[in-house]
Amino acid sequence: MLVTVKDIVAFMEGIAPPHLAEHWDNTGLAVGDYEHPVKKILVALDVIDSVIEEAVEIGADLILTHHPMLLFRKIDNITKNDAVGRRIYKLIENEIAALSAHTNLDVAEGGTNDVLAEIIGLTNVEILEETYTEELRKIVVYVPKGHLDTVRKAMCDAGGGHIGGYSHCTFQVQGEGTFLPLEGTTPYIGQEGILEKTTEWRLETVAPFNKVDRIIQAIKAVHPYEEVAYDIYPVEQKGKKEGIGRIGELEKPMTFSEVAKRLKEMLNIDDHLRLVGNPNQEIRRIGLCTGSGVEFMAAAKKQGADLYLTGDLKFHEAQKALEMGLCVGDITHYASEVIIVPVLQKALQQMAQEKGWTLEVVCSKVNGQTFWTI
């Protein structure tokens, strides 16, 4: 089956919805044609020169990365006189699309932070800092006898009726509906010009705000009436909470030094780790934020973390951690996020298999770590 850039964008938006991204982010398709066919995808952390060269060499049609190609870059013109311009030229000349999922993938369930928490082996994992709360709506529709189950299934299959660990949550009550078919109508029940009274069911459920339109369309597709009567109400309750960073517990306490040695091994870090705190301190609860997340250090301490893991730690931030009595491990920006590459590769390959797509997905072999040590 032919796969297009648009199909891959839709798949990634399902994994990491765009509304979860920070307002300053520039996630999504940076270069490419939504209708262009895709037979091979290269997954990497960054769209850098060596990754583009690799994509050209293996014949990739799309580069999927975590870091956006055009983040924090104001582009007034595209020329070959600067690095970004040359990259854009090279991608277009070789018909390679560039797609990214950044802070939305950090926040999303199963994204970078969840992957790091799983690698470390944390249990009872929670969000470190909430960044998004789902708005809910109540949807009410009036259904004639004999069609209740069909309409319920349609509205719930389209995304309604999810409360916690339960699906298809609805409420129904029977009543009497009235309507008068006017000239030119073709009523399912009754006759033109005559007031009709009929037994109907009031069926209601809750749904995320961003799924309301889809649910209404699903209801209309199976409802027998020519004109469907429905109501949409705002509600005070909030739905699913999403957020940046994670915090959880080790299965058994370890010293800071022991945790650090395990981190080097689990994250394949060849260089020295930068650590702040007493190496003999007992570590039970660990907070983390992949990439550059020092600003959430205090939140981790407030939630009882003994150790906080992130990248890009600065000198004065390390001093602040010592003052708080918080151990900190700078596991590097690169090592904390490159772990998502094989996860995305596996997810895309599995989806291709399920949908019967003719698609090959490979992980980049480029080591994008900027720093080196002697």
Image: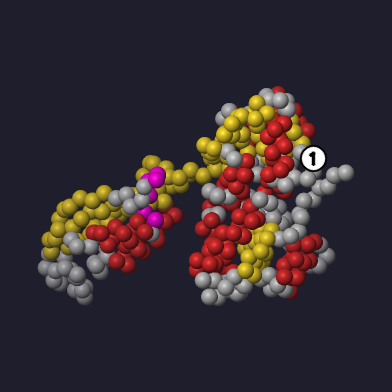
Q: Does the magenta stretch mainly form a helix, a strand or a loop? A: loop
Q: Residue at x 71, y 43 (%)?
A: 265
Q: In the displayed structure, would residue 118 be above or below residue 29?
A: above
Residue that numbered label 1 is attached to: 272
Q: In the displayed structure, would residue 58 be above or below residue 332?
A: below
Q: Is residue 228 magenta?
A: no
Q: Which residues are magenta?
A: 159-165
Q: Residue at x 14, y 58 (%)?
A: 199
Disc 1 marks a residue whose amino acid type is His
Q: Is residue 147 visible?
A: yes
Total numbered labels placed on residues in the image: 1
Q: Is residue 294 visible?
A: no
Question: Judging from the image, what secondary structure is the residue with disc 1 in?
Answer: loop
| Label 1 environment density (alpha carbons within 10 Å; few <14, some 14–19, many ≥20) | few
Residue in the foreground of this view, choosing between 234 and 84: 84
The quarter of the picture where residue 79 lies is bottom right
Q: Quadrant of the C terminus?
A: top right
Residue sitting farthest toward the right: 374
Q: Residue at x 78, y 62 (%)?
A: 50
The quarter of the picture where residue 93 lies is bottom right
Residue 42: x and y in percent read: 67, 64
